[in-house]
Image (spheres, grey):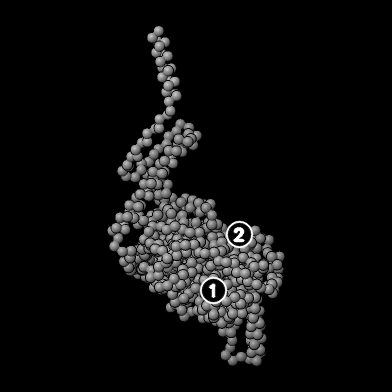
């Protein structure tokens, strides 16, 4: 009887409990953890258990704890640093052969408080134009209205384009000029290769941290993992890693110093009008390494020292200080001479070709005379059996057809016609003046007749090219085959600067002035007064921003380099040659910004191209330097 009563009461209690509403579970009070989060080990008796929900939840929880801890630590360190730092000015650094970089506050300030260069990172924007307007003016760039210009049809048929399309060799019809892609997959693959190659040369701590394979900067403010990954994403192809990684593995200084260009690229996309704290600290560490290496007889004559300095020179492109860039170049030349010349460098020619390319590039954009050791050096001949697609442009092509250019989807009919004319103009100009310099002081009658005939032929061909270029409309003119084609428009504006400089024998920086550009004065666009309101380089920069800068125009990468290198040189003004003398007005600040961006666009293209196609890019640069010599750009920088 008692047992029955007990069972009945138990059933009643369970029923009552089931009918009662569930009480909310009291929240556990978060524990305050001391020190960094500890490692959490997962165990399982079957591999499938690692994929169940409880395991995933545990991993996510641990990751969030780690993330919050790091965030709080960074905030604490930044707060302490701001309180202890008296002023955001670095003390000057003195090293042999290399001048220090001293940053100062900007005189001009935008509509809102400018970005604090001592912060670790600033938000990055999709385009540099957006970065400039948001970071310096506090708003997006207002959309530009479409110009409703009226014009007649383009007065010539692009016959060269259709002829060239038929002549494309079958063996390169499907080949790509570059093995570079601006994609997440490419970034992951490049970093995977880098980590795989670096890992055997690194000593693991306890073997738990998979990212410990990367060498680290002395400063804890710098995240070498992030910087190397960004550098791979923006500047590296498989050819880069194949040719440059062996040198990088020889010493951590080489890999870490290469990240300076990634840092300046991030500065540009963050709208930093100057250098971020991150870039300043990286440059400080690189300068200290250079000083140590120059003081050590063992490293003084090593390829690695030259590579670290050339990385520093490439990193100075964003600073845009021509005197500092020239100092680095002279330091490189002095060390090469000490080694016995360019042919004594290692890497089976890779080091010499890369050093020459960076120094040529610096000379081009600064309109400077190359140093003798680089002028006298000649790249090796192209292998005759090399059937690879090459980065052709008005400066370099194996055939008249510009085969790699004409088959790219970016290259439309009139774009090709324009580029073909620029190639012909370049060759005519150099050949004519090379021949003129070789004419004897005392000519025979036959020689005088021949010279007069060749001069007349030259003048006739140049006049035809000028007339065709002047008749090309802007891409903003609607209802034409060229409408809204901004690759075409970028090439057209660069060609106007380039052609005018050749016709009038003035530097590119002078030809960028619309009031002094002879092609612009008689062009199809000259009937619109707004074309004279700003320098051609400002228009060029804003047009390039509408194109796909990320892939540097794919098979037209050689053309992209020509356009941006011409633009960077043409953007030189007294304000932009020494950017540490800060601009005092908004106009001066924007002019400096434009030149910096054009220099960075060209620098990135050069870095990507030189490792896969070193000889073509060296030859293209030497030809552009020859053009600049003949038009009188050589007395600008000593």
Does the rendering let one see residue 291?
yes
Depth check, front residue: 353 or 30: 30
Please tell me whether mark 2 sits on a helix, a strand or a loop: loop
Decide: few, some or many residues near mark 2? Use Cα within 10 Å; few <14, some 14-19, many ≥20.
some
| Residue at the disc numbered 1 | 536
Depth check, front residue: 77 or 203: 77
Residue 264 locus on image (x, y percent):
44, 63
- Dividing the picture into quadrants, the one containing residue 121 is bottom left
> Which of the image's four quarters has the N terminus?
top left
Residue 422 locus on image (x, y percent):
61, 73
Residue at (42% x, 14% y) in the render: 8
Camera-nearest label, 1 or 2: 1
Residue at (45% x, 61% y) in the render: 270
Residue 318 locus on image (x, y percent):
44, 66
> Which of the image's four quarters has the C terminus?
bottom left
Please tell me whether mark 1 sits on a helix, a strand or a loop: helix
Residue at (59% x, 67% y) in the render: 146
Depth check, front residue: 328 or 320: 320
- Dividing the picture into quadrants, the one containing residue 324 is bottom left
| Residue at the disc numbered 2 | 176
Instruction: Answer left or right for 605 relative to 411.
Output: left
Instruction: Answer left or right for 377 relative to 294.
Output: right
Decide: few, some or many residues near mark 1? Use Cα within 10 Å; few <14, some 14-19, many ≥20.
many
Which residue ends up furthest to the top in the rendered image? 1
Instruction: Return the disc, 1 or 2, that comes first in the chain's sequence.
Output: 2
Residue 509 locus on image (x, y percent):
50, 76
């Amino acid at each position: 009887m008692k047992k029955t009563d007990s069972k009945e009461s138990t059933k009643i209690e369970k029923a009552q409990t089931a009918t009662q509403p569930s009480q909310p579970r009291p929240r556990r009070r978060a524990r305050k953890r001391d020190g960094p989060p500890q490692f959490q080990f997962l165990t399982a008796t079957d591999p499938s258990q690692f994929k169940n929900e409880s395991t995933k939840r545990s991993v996510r929880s641990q990751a969030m704890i780690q993330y919050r801890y790091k965030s709080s630590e960074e905030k604490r360190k930044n707060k302490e640093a701001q309180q202890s730092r008296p002023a955001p000015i670095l003390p000057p650094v003195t090293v042999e052969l290399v001048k220090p970089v001293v940053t100062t506050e900007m005189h001009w300030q935008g509509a809102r408080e400018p970005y604090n260069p001592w912060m670790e990172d600033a938000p990055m924007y999709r385009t540099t134009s957006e970065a400039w307007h948001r970071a310096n003016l506090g708003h997006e760039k207002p959309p530009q209205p479409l110009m409703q210009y009226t014009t007649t049809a383009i007065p010539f048929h692009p016959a060269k384009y259709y002829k060239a399309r038929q002549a494309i060799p079958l063996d390169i019809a499907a080949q790509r000029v570059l093995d570079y892609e601006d994609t997440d997959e490419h970034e992951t693959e490049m970093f995977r290769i880098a980590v795989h190659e670096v890992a055997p040369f690194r000593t693991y701590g306890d073997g738990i941290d998979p990212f410990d394979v990367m060498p680290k900067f002395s400063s804890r403010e710098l995240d070498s993992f992030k910087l190397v990954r960004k550098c791979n994403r923006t500047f590296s192809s498989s050819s880069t890693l194949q040719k440059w990684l062996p040198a990088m593995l020889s010493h951590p200084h080489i890999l870490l110093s290469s990240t300076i260009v990634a840092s300046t690229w991030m500065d540009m996309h963050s709208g930093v009008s100057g250098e971020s704290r991150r870039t300043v600290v990286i440059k400080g560490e690189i300068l200290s390494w250079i000083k140590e290496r120059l003081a050590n007889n063992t490293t003084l004559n090593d390829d690695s020292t030259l590579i670290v300095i050339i990385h520093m020179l490439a990193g100075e492109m964003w600073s845009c200080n021509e005197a500092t860039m020239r100092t680095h170049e002279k330091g490189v030349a002095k060390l090469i001479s000490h080694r016995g010349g360019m042919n004594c460098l290692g890497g089976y020619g890779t080091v010499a070709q890369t050093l020459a390319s960076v120094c040529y590039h610096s000379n081009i954009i600064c309109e400077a005379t190359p140093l003798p050791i680089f002028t006298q050096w000649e790249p090796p001949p192209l292998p005759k059996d090399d059937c690879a697609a090459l980065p052709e442009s008005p400066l370099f092509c194996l055939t008249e057809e510009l085969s790699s250019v004409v088959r790219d989807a970016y290259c439309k009919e009139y774009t090709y016609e324009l580029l073909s004319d620029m190639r012909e103009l370049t060759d005519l100009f150099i050949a004519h003046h090379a021949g003129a310099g070789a004419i004897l002081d005392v000519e025979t009658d036959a020689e005088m007749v021949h010279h007069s005939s060749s001069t007349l032929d030259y003048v006739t061909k140049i006049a035809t090219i000028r007339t065709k270029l002047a008749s090309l409309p802007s891409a903003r003119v609607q209802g034409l085959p060229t409408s809204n084609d901004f690759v075409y428009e970028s090439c057209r504006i660069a060609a106007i600067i380039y052609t005018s400089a050749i016709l009038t024998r003035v530097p590119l920086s002078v030809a960028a002035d619309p009031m002094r550009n002879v092609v612009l004065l008689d062009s199809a666009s000259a009937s619109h007064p707004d074309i004279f309101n700003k320098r051609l380089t400002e228009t060029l920069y804003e047009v390039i921003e509408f194109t796909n800068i990320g892939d540097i125009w794919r098979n037209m990468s050689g053309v992209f380099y020509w356009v941006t290198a011409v633009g960077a040189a043409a953007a030189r003004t007294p304000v932009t040659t020494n950017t540490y003398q800060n601009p005092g007005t908004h106009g001066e600040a924007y002019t400096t910004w434009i030149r910096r961006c054009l220099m960075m666009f060209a620098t990135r293209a050069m870095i990507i191209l030189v490792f896969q196609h070193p000889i073509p890019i060296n030859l293209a640069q030497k030809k552009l330097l020859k053009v600049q010599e003949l038009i009188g750009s050589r007395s600008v920088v000593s």
